Image (tube, helix red, strand yellow):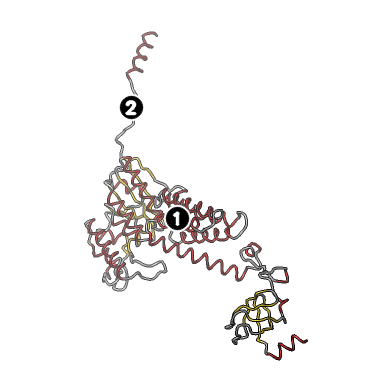
Amino acid sequence: MKRLLSVLFFVLIFIQPLPASGDQDTVYVIPLKNEVEKGLYAFINRAVHEAEAEGAKAIILDIDTPGGFVDAADDIAQVITETKIKTVAFVNKDALSAGAYIALNADEIYMTPNASMGAAAVINQDGTAADQKAQSAWLAKMKSAAENGNRDPLYAMAMVDDSIDLPEYDAPKGKLLTLTAKNAEEVGYAEGIVQNLEELLAKLGLEDANVKHVKESFADRLARFITHPVIVPILLSLGSLGLIVELYTPGFGLAGITGLVSLLLFFYGHYISGLAGLESLLLFLSGVILVIAELFIPGGIAGFSGLGLIIVSILIAGENVWHMAISLFIAITAGILTMVIMMKFFGKKITWLNKLVLRDATTTEKGYVSNPSRTDLLGKTGYALTPLRPAGTVAIGNERIDAVTEGGFIPENAAVKVIEVEGVRVVVREMKKDQTDKEVTG
């Protein structure tokens, strides 16, 4: 028994557990879903850097997008082309417009049987075609992406330019090219057609790889929503309107909270997306402090300086200052129009709106007197201390009174009589000799 235990003891000492394979390939699967915008770029940028840090063997972009914004697509494409890791575009359903451009920048493209790729014309936010300059620049980008991937640029150009005639692919003149999976494989725009991700991994020889699916967190999804070009002006409008209302109402209430939350969400989304740094948030907070200081230190310097810092912080929070300037202009305009509309149509119905406007009038009936009225002078006589042309000075009793004539000239020392008093305005008329004698005898 002792001999058996000794043998087991030595076996346990010398037998080590097999270490986990440290050289197992890792594949990162990054979803590229919904609209292409700056928030998506920030998410993909972080995911690619994470894959690089872990030494991934390949990055698979799981694409299903109707397209989106050109500048965001260009940024995403740059991230894909700059990484040294092999990139594969897996068109799971649609890679349209900006999605087609991103796919063409990957090292390889695979599509599911029902997938499509193309229709990449540039359109404005109102749905109309972009100007010729923007179309030309986008056409050059699509052509370059195809050429860099050793693909025939004709088909990439046909996705943008409807003057290219490709009737065999259902794209005659006047219609943009959209390739089916079969067509894409035929013209060399797809390396193959696969049913699912597992089949794609097998095609790549990575069926035994450690697959890491990168998922968007709640913060990522919130940031994508907040940084959408349509949402940005709305948040800024709510922010400006809320703060304007709060400045005209006593205390701190719902309007102020709404304004601050909207602006904080704006900065949060841009910070999470990597579009804004701490400097923009610090500038914003400094501006708010200066605006509040204006309430206690009148003069305007602190207030205007604060507003300037807030505007600058918003402008530098986005990647494109011009786009942020447009959003800010829309927000300010919307805020002013909303205030005007609310005051005009709802001013009497909504209690807190009444606090924005001073409705009380300082009338005499309420006891307010802006200047003392000299109605006691009415009918009194005196003489002109200076010529009245038509204004001058008259003496009435022991008082010097500033007076005006009815429009004519009254010489110095001429006898005058007060015929009208309107507040501080005293109107006099020259008295003739017979009138003066009558006043004296009477």
Q: Is residue 225 something one can see in this rendering?
A: no
Mark 2 or 1: in front is 1
Residue furthest bottom in the image: 434
Find the distance from the CA under tag 2 to the CA under tag 1: 61 Å
What label sits on residue 309 in the rendered view? 1
Q: Residue at x 34, y 62 (%)?
A: 97
Q: Quadrant of residue 360?
A: bottom right
Circle 1 sits in a helix, a strand or a loop, which is it?
helix
- What amino acid is found at the position of numbered circle 1 in the picture? Leu
Amino acid type, residue under disc 2 in the picture: Leu
Classify mark 2: helix, strand or loop.
Answer: loop
Q: Is residue 397 left or right of residue 4?
A: right
Residue at 71% across, 78% down? 377
Residue under the point 63% across and 85% down: 406
The tag earlier along the polypeptide, 2 or 1, is 2
Mark number for residue 18? 2
Q: Position of residue 12 (x, y in %)?
A: 36, 18
State whether residue 106 is above or below residue 332. above
Q: Toward the viewer: 8 or 282?
A: 282
Q: In the image, 55: left or right of 367?
A: left
